[in-house]
Image (cartoon, rainbow, N blue to C red):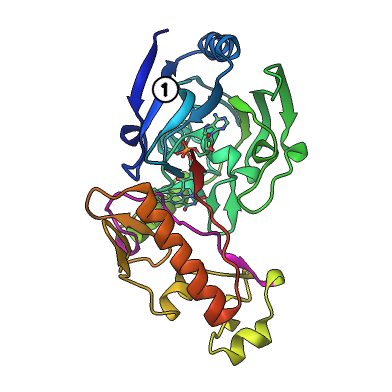
Amino acid sequence: MKIKQNILLKDYTTFKIGGPADYFCLARSQEDVQTAIDFAKEKNLEILVLGGGSNLLISDTGFRGLAIKLDLQKLESHDNEVIVGAGVILAYLLNKSLARGLTGLEFAAGIPGTVGGAIRGNAGTYGLAMSDVVKEITYFDENYQIKVCQGDKCHFAYRHSIFKEIKAIIIEAKLKLAKGDLRVAQKLVAERLKYRQDTQPTEPSAGCIFKNVEFKTVDIEDLKKRGLETEQFAKHQKIPTAYIIEKAGLKGHTIGGVKVSEKHANYIINTDQATAEQVVMLISFIKQQIRDKYGIQLQEEVQFIG
Ligand SMILES: Cc1cc2nc3c(=O)[nH]c(=O)nc-3n(C[C@H](O)[C@H](O)[C@H](O)COP(=O)(O)OP(=O)(O)OC[C@H]3O[C@@H](n4cnc5c(N)ncnc54)[C@H](O)[C@@H]3O)c2cc1C
């Protein structure tokens, strides 16, 4: 495995933003990851794990350390179980699972990125997430020892897992799927992809910038007084942040090459050679506006690097 120097990270993110990493490698096996770890230890370098780069905002000055792009492509199935490498693209996993008669990942239709990134952030939609299918995870822990964590011990919560609490490198996961009705599953996937096409922007972005707002974290009566009706979201106990940003009149707000998407207000899109600095300025502006108007403190879903 080659360890290269001075590699531009914007090419490894869906936002198309980010400066260079001092060192960069493409790890195709657990042994490659071990070699990368040894290299980082020897040179006393920080490690950045890159999956699909679909939830990342990397600074314009880049990353002072070793970026490891995970390309672990294992994919095996035994009955209802699938063992999958952290570098496998979620959409590929969904398609392969359906082709093998396994359902349960339909919620992931249209979520970009890899299995490793999805597990770390407990990615999901429609009330389901990776935590609903993950049975076991193999990872390097913060001391770079290989460990196995059972799904119910991974501290999974809304866009959260134990892998956000410790510096871990997820290597592979065992998922529990089901032999469900394939026709129903395929129809659902097609509908969800179409819905995304209709409602989400196609310009470079990192998906939703902020987490949705959980009912338990806000005063619903106070929001009503401030003109923000939320009853329609009571079923899922979360207020979509896109709705809040839209109500605040921020759709289309632009700073330099970044803009609050007109199609989906929780997306910041890169319209013209945007910089990370511009994104950070727009995020700060949105947060301040929403705090002033509704007293809500928005939390970022996107991960900042550098
Ligand atoms: C158009 C669009 C739509 C989206 N829709 C959704 C959605 O519906 N639901 C949703 O939840 N998210 C959504 N996202 C966000 C994003 O796709 C998910 O968060 C995704 O799971 C990130 O995976 P990734 O491989 O791209 O991770 P990356 O962006 O590469 O990394 C994200 C974080 O995880 C870490 N990481 C990555 N791989 C590993 C690993 N193997 N071990 C340890 N750490 C790792 C990285 O270091 C980083 O901190 C969307 C994004 C876009 C661009």
- Dot 1 surroundings within 10 Å: few (below 14), some, or many (20 or more)? some
Q: Nearer the viewer, residue 196 or 178?
A: 196
Residue 23, given in percent of the width and then of the height, sits at 43, 19
Among the 4 quarters of the image, the one containing residue 279: bottom left
Q: Is residue 88 visible?
A: no
Q: Position of residue 219 (x, y in %)?
A: 69, 80
Residue drawn at (24%, 55%) of the image: 271
Q: Amino acid at mark 1?
A: Asp
Query: What is the chief secondary structure element of the magenta stretch?
Result: loop
Position of residue 290 relative to residue 4, above or below, is below
Whether residue 205 is visible: yes
Residue 293 among those drawn in magenta: no
- Residue under numbered circle 1: 22
Left or right of 27, for residue 225: right
- Span shown in magenta: 198-215
Q: How many marks?
A: 1
Q: Is residue 215 above or below residue 131?
A: below
- Kindly identify the residue that appears in the image at 62 percent across and 40 percent down: 133
Residue 204 among magenta residues: yes
